[in-house]
Image: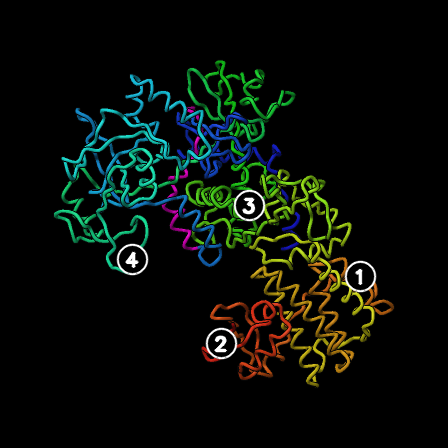
Amino acid sequence: MLKWWVLQEVTTCSPDYYAHTQRLFLYLLKHNLAYRASSVVNWDPVDETVLANEQVSPTGHSWRSGALVEKKELEQWFFRITAFKEQLLADLESLKDSWPERVRTMQRNWIGKSVGAKVRFPVGEGCAVVEVFTTRLDTLQGVQYLALSISHPLVHQLAEANGELRRFIDDSKTGRREDDVTSTRGFRLDGMVATNPLDSGARLPVFVANYVVEGYGEEAVMGVPGHDMRDHTFWCENCPGEEIKTVVEPSSSKETGDGIFTDRGVLTCGEYKGLTSAEAHQTFLETLGNEWAEETTQWRLRDWLVSRQRYWGAPIPIIHCSSCGTVPVSEEDLPVLLPEGISIRGRGGSPLAKAEEWVNVPCPSCGEPAKRDTDTMDTFIDSSWYWARYVDPKNPNQLFDAEKADKLLPVDLYVGGVEHAILHLLYSRFIAKFLAGPAGLWPNPSNNTAEPFKKLVTQGMVHGLTYTDPNTGRFLKPDELTYETPSQPKIKASGLTPNKSYEKMSKSKYNGVDPLTCIATHGADATRAHILFAAPVADVLNWDEDKIIGVRRFLLRVLKRADICTFVESPPSLPEISTPQERKLWKCLNDAVRSVTEAFSESLAMNTTISDLMKLENAIESERKDCSVAVVYAATQIMLRLLAPITPAVAEEAWEMLHRGTRLEGSKVLQQPWPQVDTRVFEEADVKDVAIAFNGKVRLTVQVEGEVEGGIVRELLRGRKEWEKWASGKEIVRVVVAKGGKLVNFVVR
């Protein structure tokens, strides 16, 4: 199976692949899950293309160009991802033991199910009503203003006769400041007041505010400065000095604190005084009735905008005819190839629109002159289903064969960055559920929930050492520094000591590291092993090349060990273990086999794999004089087999040294079977996995033979890096053995 799998390859920019991306588009269109609509979209003014909501940063910038995103109304293609919102949310529960909680939380928040109430506020002298969604109906008595988005219908209506308001709207669309996503900028609609439906005497000012999100919910917010931080900030800036009403207080004195109270509690005003927030919610619904309030659910997730005005990407397989309207390209005519020989600047709108010979085609339905759709699909569509194409990459007529999909999907392990949590990973989940549901292409998913990836590991990023000027904060280039000592540079121009930090590698920060330089200096094996050893797979790795020397020394010891080890002709697979030293070494060896096997197959804890192999090499060195040559040879050979996937060149060279002049000369370490655990060493004694804590926080787990005692565990830990970090140089106040020996807590100070 492994040999079959590694031969599979897909290239998403190849016509052989994107023909099926276009086929997927047509399937979605057939099931009413792809549609074209006029909508206010995110517009990148630099790349001159639209962006999906997921491609706009929290500060309102384009994920690619970095430009501040504008709002523009265009007719675009969408995928109806919201049709699967309930399933996408519910099925996150099935991933709780196999996906990082951080990713699940990010997706849960992005899908954004909110249960609350829709409240109607009378506005103006006529019969206008503004609807507001809130999850805090209990704070209705504390409403002091309404805020509308710049695209709210009432705002559009008023802007026709209000030049100042039009300028505010135009400025918000095209001249946005970087902080406008959390801005407190507001435009008060003079003469416009709203009425609180719970208290007809409460007259509320109405604002147009940048912080109210366009296209989300009702595009209106009820402002409660006394119980919402954002509303509080907005009110203080736009109505300085005016009273702030509070209508909810903590239900107990333990909950009191500084600042405004934003949690649920007990009402403090009027006839509703003493009601809990939950009781008030229900009471207000009953008091207002369906005319003014109703319970409802709102979702943050919006349909996936997939049109792009770029050359790269699969052309949308649609032809626009003045008589027939929108006509899909026939599957037999796929792929719709990208035109060649045209000017591609990457910016300035869609280059496909300028390829007249390509654009102008006869209508497939009536034969009259028509035009191709000149947008391409978001390239995230290509990556949203490539994982499924691997099971059948040469199939010319289908995305993949259903029988192969049932047999081989879902993917067992996916390793990717957390930055794709609400992009690629969410899109892949949506497409998986479409393929398994309406499309019927994956009819019997083995996990029942049609999740594309069984297990997800989000690898940490490598951060580089970054220097900044302490006065200006400017990032410093390497040639702007001079080194009095290797670890402490000075700024050439000023003589000042620069600030140092580890940050994501970037050209603009001058903190990148060329891996080829590192490999040339230390070798590929040492570089790879150092990367794996320096941090857990999901953690940030602060790159420090000076520390690679420890791994290099370890690999040199491995080579020396192989060179001096005595070959044993036809050694038994399980050598006889008789002395205490042999038992100790064989136990250490099998601990390593077990932990390394688990790391490769389950936990991916490669950092502990390297440390376990270092520990094994030390054990061979310290115990070899008191062990038989058969035991030492077997331990050395198994160590090389465990090391081979991480440092193949060193392991192969050591294997050759070990078997030079023997019948195994010429054999390859990577062709040997994977070592198996010798269970005898664990059966001979009562071996427990013991969690080790320092001041109540578990830091590691060790195996202890026989009775668990503080002194024994302390001796086992001596020399380990965890002991050096958490206990070295500190006073051991007491040692507590708990949970029947499963936990040992060292109280240190």
For badge 2, the amino acid type reads Lys
Residue 736 location (% of width, % of height): 48, 78
Residue 156 location (% of width, % of height): 31, 22
Alpha carbons under labels 3 and 2: distance apart:
42 Å
Q: Quadrant of the N terminus?
A: bottom right
**Image quadrant of residue 717?**
bottom right
> Does residue 721 appear anywhere in the picture?
yes
The residue most toward the left is: 271
Q: Which residues are magenta?
A: 72-94
Give the labeled residue for mark 3: 387
Query: Which of disc 1 and disc 2 is earlier in sequence?
Result: 1
The residue most toward the right is: 661
Residue 77 in magenta stretch = yes
Give the labeled residue for mark 1: 653
Residue 207 location (% of width, % of height): 29, 30
Give the labeled residue for mark 4: 255
Query: Which of disc 2 and disc 3 is earlier in sequence?
Result: 3
Of residues 651 and 47, the one drawn nearer to the viewer in this rendering = 47
